């Protein structure tokens, strides 16, 4: 199958659904260095799904070839379509594909691409493909987007009342004093979602680290906690600041 022709089809669909005003706004909002067509996220998902419907015979190698071809052109919507295709076919991905996913993460440079790749795609592969060693490497990477990815890749497992909280805790401890907003926010995000099912676990973890956690981490993490738990953490933080 000629994946270049499929990529051209997707390109034509995306351009037809775009809008100049939205493109300008989105590019500014994301501070993006990519070209933007101004296509909504639901429309991008529709384009990705339509490829699957029209070409059910698409093989694994064809899929990866199509993803790489779409991604190779620095257009936001093309890259988003590539990510959506991976989401739709995540059960068929294998360990050899992780190198492609890592390259995509390193080239993303925006939460709009990183978060979906890390949480929805890689997060779905972590346990099945035993990617702990890969995440360990990302967690100490010099690129903060890779460190954010290591955190978010653990999110799906933790949301299922399972996952590796011990590994997350180790990552979060090593990043707790970071100044980078996107890392601080990711720690709080994972804690917030974990707290929806295991509030006591998150409460105890956060209370022990209240002196080091950033404001954005704490604000995110305590959202699902009880009023009493939130008050206790905020009081401990206030007390620590007065010392």
Image (cartoon, rainbow, N blue to C red):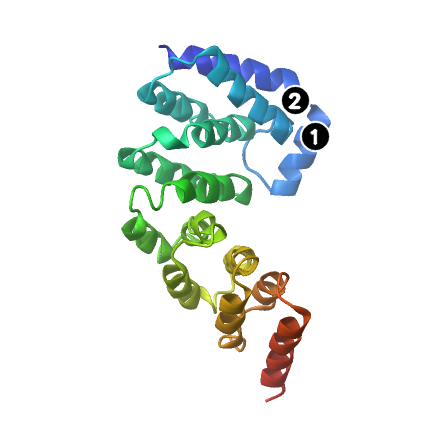
Residue 198 as seen in the image, left or right of residue 135: right
Name the quarter where the C terminus is drawn: bottom right
- Packing grade of label 1 (10 A; few <14, some 14-19, many >=20) is some
The residue at the point 35 percent across, 45 percent down is: 126
Q: Is residue 109 visible?
A: no
Against 135, is 62 above or below?
above
Residue 12 shown left or right of residue 102 in the figure:
right
Q: Kindly identify the residue that appears in the image at 62 percent across and 61 percent down.
A: 224
Question: Which quarter of the image is occupied by the N terminus?
Answer: top left
Q: Residue at x 31, y 37 (%)?
A: 99
Please name the residue shown 53% across and 28% down the image: 75
Tag of residue 168: none
Q: Nearer the viewer, residue 16 or 85?
A: 85
Element at label 1: helix
Q: Nearer the viewer, residue 156 or 15?
A: 156
Can you give x and y, in whole percent of width and height, for residue 48 in the image?
52, 22
Numbered badge on residue 22: 1
Where disc 2 sits, the SS reads loop
Residue 62 in view, yes or no: yes
Cβ atoms under marks 1 and 2 closer than 8 Å = yes
Which residue in the rendered view is the most extreme toward the bottom?
A: 243
- Is 235 left or right of 198, judged from the image as shown? right
Alpha-carbon span between mark 1 and mark 2 = 8 Å
x, y (%) of residue 23? 66, 29
Q: Pointer 2: what residue?
A: 18
Could you say where residue 205 lies in the image, as x and y percent from the top left?
48, 71
The correct choice, above or below, for 17 with respect to 180 in the image is above
């Amino acid at each position: 199958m000629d994946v270049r022709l499929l990529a051209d089809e997707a390109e034509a669909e995306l351009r037809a659904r775009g809008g100049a005003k939205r493109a300008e706004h989105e590019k500014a909002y994301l501070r993006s260095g990519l070209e933007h067509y101004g296509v909504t996220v639901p429309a991008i998902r529709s384009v990705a799904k339509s490829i699957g419907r029209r070409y059910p015979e698409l093989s694994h190698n064809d899929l990866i070839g199509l993803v790489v071809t779409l991604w190779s052109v620095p257009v936001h919507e093309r890259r988003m379509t590539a990510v959506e295709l991976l989401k739709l076919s995540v059960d068929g991905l294998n360990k050899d594909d992780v190198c492609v996913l890592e390259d995509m993460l390193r080239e993303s440079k925006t939460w709009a691409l990183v978060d979906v790749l890390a949480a929805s795609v890689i997060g779905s592969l972590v346990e099945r493909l035993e990617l702990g060693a890969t995440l360990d490497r990302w967690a100490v990477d010099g690129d903060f987007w890779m460190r954010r990815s290591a955190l978010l890749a653990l999110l799906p497992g933790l949301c299922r009342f399972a996952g590796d909280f011990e590994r997350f805790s180790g990552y979060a401890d090593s990043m707790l004093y970071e100044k980078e907003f996107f890392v601080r926010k990711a720690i709080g995000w994972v804690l917030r979602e974990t707290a929806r099912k295991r509030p006591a676990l998150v409460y105890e973890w956060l209370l022990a680290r209240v002196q080091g956690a950033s404001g954005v981490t704490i604000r995110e993490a305590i959202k699902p906690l009880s009023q009493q738990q939130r008050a206790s953490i905020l009081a401990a933080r206030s007390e620590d600041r007065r010392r």
